[in-house]
Amino acid sequence: MKPVVDSLGAGLDRVGFMDEIRLRMEHDLPFNNVAKVFLDVRIFRWCNSVVDYLEFLSEDSAALDHLEKALPRFVAGLHSSVVYRSRSDSRLDVMVRCRCSPQNSTVRMTEGRNCLWKPPVVYAEGREELTVLAPEPDRFRSLYRDLRGVARVERLKKVAVSADVLRVSYTLSLSELFHDLTAKQLEILLRAVERGYFDLPKAVSLERLAQDASLSESTLQEHLSKAESRLVRALAPYLRLYAASFPR
């Protein structure tokens, strides 16, 4: 279903609809401060209240070098820690433990006013872009007042969208996806992915993976098979939800 433009903000039957508002903000909250310093880097952020997953993209590898060196100081300022890091010439991926609060995060402010937000949040050239889903106008008005208290806020776009848009915005819970895996299964599955076992053609054999893990081939295969089976079962609800959105 296509969004229904609500340019006048009145005269629209709101049953089954909510407002989607795209905002651009200038403020001094932590992630945006990084974007102020590293103007040649675009930052994409996902947060599940446990970790923040950050993608830093730039065609200037030197800019990413400087950012990577500054990362420990930035993370320490958040009283957080890095749990994952990956780097290529034009991209730095970092996962940090979430330390968001209504005092330092527009995302938490949004949730505090009973609104939703659509990931990723984008930071570029010292400004943040955030998309908010507000079930009721009063909720957004309250949020807008909160945001104005910490930021210069510009409304880029406002449309009325069907509540079905949440199907598209539905995000996977990592705890739901992986909670059935044992620590050993997770370790072996991750090692298999990183070593290229699932590549076509395979970059490493089952025999070599088993040797490196000090396991028999049959034991390693059993761990992999159980991990794959549990992942597919955990994905089943999301597969059904996504499949239901396809036109028949």
Image (cartoon, grey):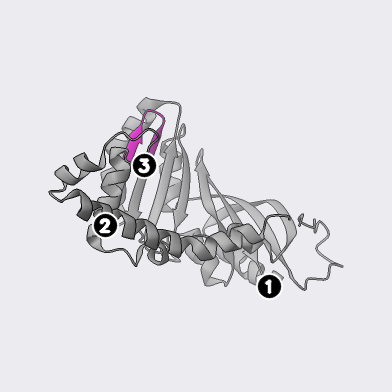
**Viewer-nearest residue: 201 or 144:** 201
The residues tagged by marks 1 and 3 sit, at their Cα atoms, a distance apart of 50 Å
Q: Earlier in the sequence, mark 2 or mark 1?
A: 1
Residue type marked 3: Phe
Q: Residue at x 36, y 26 (%)?
A: 62
Give the magenta part as a residue range. Answer: 85-92
Occupied quadrant, residue 16: bottom right
Sequence-wise, the earlier of marks 1 and 3 is: 1
* Residue 210 among magenta residues: no
Outermost residue, left side: 214
Query: Where residue 151 sits in the image (x, y, percent)?
Result: 54, 55
For the residue carrying disc 3, how many other residues have a C-alpha within 10 Å: few (<14), some (14-19), or many (20+)? some
> Which sits in the foreground, 16 or 244?
244
**Disc nearer the start of the sequence (2/3):** 3
Residue occupying the point 29% across, 49% down: 190
Between the residue at mark 2 and the residue at mark 1, the CA separation in whole angstroms equals: 51 Å
Residue 162 appears left or right of 133: right
Query: SS at mark 3?
Result: loop
- Eye-nearest disc, 2 or 1: 2
Which quadrant is home to the N terminus?
bottom right
**Residue highlighted by disc 2:** 223
User: Magenta: predominant secondary structure element?
Assistant: strand
Residue at the spot x=32%, y=31% of the render? 65
Residue 91 is inside the magenta segment: yes
Q: Say which mark, if any, is on residue 138.
A: 1
Which residue type carries mark 2? His
Residue linked to disc 3? 198
